[in-house]
Image (tube, grey):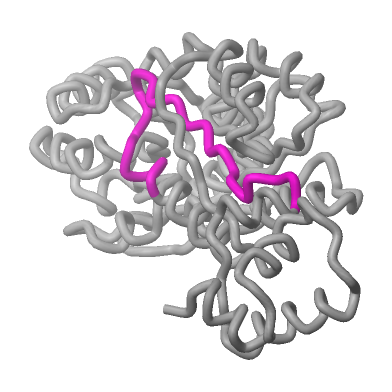
Amino acid sequence: MVKITDVARHAGVSPSTVSYALSGKRPISEETRQRVEESIRELGYRPHAGARALASSRSNVVALVVPLRGGVHVPVVMQFAVSVVTAARRHDHDVLLLTQEEGEDGLRRVADSALVDALIVMDVQLQDPRLPLLRALDRPSVLIGFPALAEGLTCIDLDFTAAGELCVEHLAGLGHRVVALVGSPPEVYVRETGFAQRVVRGFTAAADRRGLASSVHPCEASPAAARRTAEQLLRERPALTGVVVHNEPVLEPLIDAFEQLGLRVPGDLSVTAICPDELAGSLRVPVTSIAIPSAEVGTRAVELLMRKLGGTPVPEATLLTPRLTERASTAPRRLTQ
């Protein structure tokens, strides 16, 4: 590992001069500065974070705010986190992961401490109480998710309204006339999490537009809840032939429950989902699905943030177009149904 003393020796200056060149704490001649910078490049020296911060008045740290609230599916959240960390490292930034539910107070504490240069905020609610502070902070931020009113903010996400619509359009195109959405856990809807609300909006709008009978069913993230939901659907909607699932943990248990209740997938019941591709493709019956583009969203969120840190204007809203992959879980409705 190259040390500051190695740089000093190569440049023919003292270690303190190298330190001054990095930190800017004392003036040095332009010739000496260039000689030091050339030695740093040639030797591949990487100054530690403290030196970089002194030189730039920045910490080179981004806060990723991911409150692990009830109903949050941690594996998917961690996919977003990994993509943010990976992209941030490409820009020579580290990531401070904040998972406690602290709301506005937590954001203010981190911002006031000068620990971070900028923030990426997840699990955005339609009426998110953190928004006034985010608009007022002197540090740039990017939201993964959209509140009801996004003016003055920078937001990116999958177009979940279009995703809900696309699932219904796929089922309607196969001739299904009675459909249901098995959605996120109830607490996700109670706190009006944006992505869940938008799936419902898109699902309902497309079903109404197509003249389909439809219903929405929040579901706890457990096999027992999946079984109860399947039983309820068959009791209340005996003509049901199409289901959209937006709740990763219950996808497989729900298919199992329907089949235990006498409905074969896709012979009697077509199932679509909004979930990671690797989950949809790995099930006993591979599921037609719209992918959660966690890698793309995380990477682009970091890129937006870096542009904001550099003073470059960015779009306020970035919505990624959903893409549906057909697999073995959907088929045309049987005419006898």
Location of residue 247 in the rendering, given as x and y in whole percent from the top left corner: 36, 34
Give the image location of residue 194, x and y in percent: 59, 25
Horizontal side of 36 relative to 109 (left or right) equals right
Report the front residue among 136 and 77. 136
Q: Which residues are magenta?
A: 56-78
Residue at horizontal 45 percent and vertical 21 percent from the top: 216
Q: Position of residue 324 (x, y in %)?
A: 52, 58
Count the marks: how many? 0
Q: Is residue 64 magenta?
A: yes
Image height of 317 relative to 133, above or below: below
Is 58 in front, or is 109?
Answer: 58
Image x and y of residue 325, in percent: 47, 63
Screen quadrant of the C terminus = top left
Of 169 and 138, nearer the camera is 138
On the picture, is 275 further left or further right than 22?
Answer: left
Q: Among all residues in the image, which is located at the extreme left?
A: 260
What residue is at 78 percent from the left and 56 percent from the top? 24
Please tell me which residue lies in front, 86 or 76: 86
Is residue 212 visible from the viewing direction of this image?
no
Q: Is residue 264 left or right of residue 110?
A: left
319 drawn magenta: no
- Looking at the figure, which quarter contains the N terminus? bottom left
**Going 62% across and 38% down the picture, which residue do you hit?**
116
- Position of residue 17 relative to residue 193, above or below, is below
Q: Quadrant of residue 159?
A: top right
Q: Is residue 322 visible?
A: yes
Residue for point 54% across, 17% down: 106
